[in-house]
Structures are given as C-alpha cells and as structure tokens.
Amino acid sequence: MKILHTSDWHLGRSLFGRSRYAEFEAFLEWLAGVLEREQVDALVVAGDIFDTTTPSNRAQELYYRFLCRVAALDCCRHVVIVGGNHDSPSFLNAPAQLLRALDVHVIGATPSAIEDELLTLRGVDGSPQALIAAVPYLRDRDIRTVEAGESMEDKQSKLIHGIQAHYAAVCEKASEIRIEMERKRNLEIPLIATGHLFSAGGKTTDDDGVRELYVGSLAQVNAQSFPQELDCLALGHLHVPQSVGAQDHMRYCGSPLSMGFGEAGQRKQVVMVEFAGRTPQVTPLDIPCFQPLQRVKGSLDEICSRLERLKQEHSNAWLEIEYTGTDIGDTLREQVELVLEDSDMERLRLRNSTLMNKVIHRASVEETLDDLDGFQVFERCLDAYAIEEDERAELKQLYSEIVDTVCEEDSNAE
C-alpha cells in the first residue's frame, strides 16, 4: 500500500499582488505525474487546499481538473481531502457526494458522528488495505465548551484535552473496526490519521502566513497527544517539512510552494509512505521549484552587485530587496530598476529599512502595516491610549477571541 501525503496547497494565493496560478498548475501537473509514475494507491491532502474561504474560479478550476485527472488514473484509487483553517467547510463539503463517485473523499469539518471520519481504503479486489481517520482542522467550537469566568489557562487546557479526546475517540473506533477486519482477512491493516494543527516545537518561517490556530497560541499538541495505535500521522498547517517529536511516522510534508520570501530557497516536499503490513517506510520526495524567490539585502553597492550576479546567471527570480545602507537612499528605486533592465527578474518588494527606521523613530504612527501583524497593531493601540498594565491581559484575551471567531467564520455557510 502506497500513500502520498501533501498539504497546504493554498490555491489562489498571490505574492505581493503577483498571481501564482502558473506555479499551482505546474505543481498539480507534477503531482499527477508522481502518482502515476510511483503507482501510488491513495493521495492524502491534509488541509488548506485553498487560500481563502471564497476561492476564485481559476483556483476552483485547477482543483477540480486535478481531481478528474487523478480519478482517471489506473493506480490511484482513492483521494482523501480534509479541510484546513483556510478552507470553507461548507464549500469543500458541497460536492462531496458527487466526488465520492470518483473515489474522492472530502471531510471539510468535524462531522456529527465520529464514524463519518473513518474511511476504509480497498484494493482492486475489494479487500481492505488501510483505515484512515480523516480528521480535519478541529475548530475551537468543535472541541471546547465555553464557560463564564474561565481563565486563559483553562481555555488552553480544554483545547489540548479536546484535541486529544477527539483523536482518542476516533482511533478507538478505528481500532475496533481494524481488529474485526484483520480477524476476518488474516492480514495486517495500517491505521493512518490526518490532522491540521500546530504541534509543539513546530518550525515556521517569517511571512509564511502560518498563524496560531487557537486563542492565546498555547494550544500546541505534542507527539504523546496522539494514540499509540496510529501507524502514520499525516499533518498539515506548518509549511516547513518536519517530523513531530522526532517520530518519523508523524509528519508535516509542508507547503508545495514557498508562500513568502521567508521560505525562499527552502526545499519543498511531498511524503511517500509505503506499508509492509502495519510498518511504514517514509520517503520524502523533493518538489521542483517552479518559480524561484530571492531575498537581496544590504547596502546599495551590495544589492547591485548581487543583482548583477543573478543577472549573469540568467535568473528569473522574483525579488524581495531590503536596503540597509547608512544614508536614506533617495535614488534606491531608480538604481535597482536600472540594474534589472533586460533581465527576467521581477522586483515584488522593495524595503528601505534605513528610511523606515528614521520615520519610525520620529513618529511610530507612520510605521507601515506591512511590518506589523494584527496583534502588534493592537499592542500599539493599547500604548497609544495608555491602557494600564492590569487591564491589558483581559483586553488582549478578548481581542484574540474576536480574531479567532472572525478567522473561523464560514462565509459559504447558510
């Protein structure tokens, strides 16, 4: 049994206003080729298929065209897709019954019955090959009851215990089914689970768009949070390929494209898992880079020198340029554009850190929002209104809850 694990496609995402549909299309074309070449039995996509809850027509076209192509392959008999925090559960679930006819199993949100998260993957002869606990992104309301007067620590504890309880329940049910199947068939059947969450110690990069999933940022589970009977855990949400707690069978495959310049040069992967009975053999497969990104930083001379070298290498990279020279750099933009003439490179972002630091030093209100996240802006507001320290904790908690509610709102729901 061969399973290919991928996640965090973020179809429709742009980079500083630049469309990336050509990259997404190239990745899906490559992925379909890998499925066929490696004779993969099942594809597992662990959330964040789309970048927003209202994906564009072009993003939807890429998604459905890919699923139709995979359904036509002789080898890949199953596709399992679970929703992530960026996805609209109702949007993903809407065509679920139709896609089931193509052996595409979609679980956009936590179903009312835990059995509905369990899928049996069968071979050509109808015999069971694997059990999948297709757990999507567990929203706050799915795993925690709100009580008046509870502290932030209480909420965090409830969230972690809610995640652990959900996996324990679904795996307990799966184990019952597996025992019965193995008894009848006299064979070993692997149990695989999916998830879309933030594990303790997980690695991220700046500007990758990965945000904390729950109020207060402490609800991070570790390897011990998952049931021991799991033979493989295919996770999404973190964009850097990595294992959980040094457990090779518990993996984030990462995003297939670099979602920001913080991921420039990062090796992107999908993960192949081949089972001999219940024992997994894990093999990462490198994804080609369809559009290189480059960060260029330094004085004007250093920036121009680096750009000239890239130009000589016939680079077609998209560029983030950060000027850190000692003077203001009044002609920075003109100088950069002059060097980039007659090249295939494109400047997507130009930051003048020297000028910005002088402006911020003079008046912090002129600091660009591009340099701050939402929580930092809220902190500045608290500073501006001279909010006392003893009031801040409660206000920050309330703000976190509002942000969490807005981010989880499903714009496609009735």
Image (cartoon, rainbow, N blue to C red):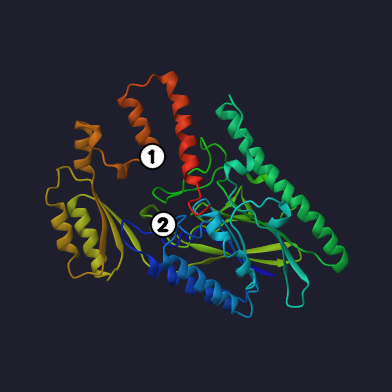
Q: Residue at x 50, y 41 (%)?
A: 405
* Distance (Cα) linking label 2 and label 1: 19 Å
**Classed neighbour count for the residue bearing mark 2: other residues with Cα under 10 Å, few (<14), some (14–19), many (≥20):** many
To which residue does mark 1 refer? 374
- In the rendered image, the quadrant that contains the N terminus is bottom right
Question: Which one is closest to the eye, mark 2 or mark 1?
Answer: 1
Query: Do we see residue 289 in this rendering?
Result: no
Numbered-mark total: 2
Kind of residue at badge 1: Gly
Residue 90 percent across, percent down from the top left? 55, 56
Image coordinates of residue 297 in percent, x first then y, are 27, 51
Contact? badges 2 and 1 (CB < 8 Å): no
Question: Does residue 376 appear in the picture of this structure?
Answer: yes
- Which mark, residue 259? 2
Q: What element carries label 2?
A: loop
Give SS at disc 1: helix
Q: Which residue lies furthest to the front in this view?
A: 414
Q: Residue at x 51, y 60 (%)?
A: 49
From the viewer's perspective, tell me whether residue 72 is left or right of residue 264. Answer: right
Q: Is residue 70 left or right of residue 353?
A: right
Q: Earlier in the sequence, mark 2 or mark 1?
A: 2
The spot of residue 5 in percent (x, y) is 59, 63
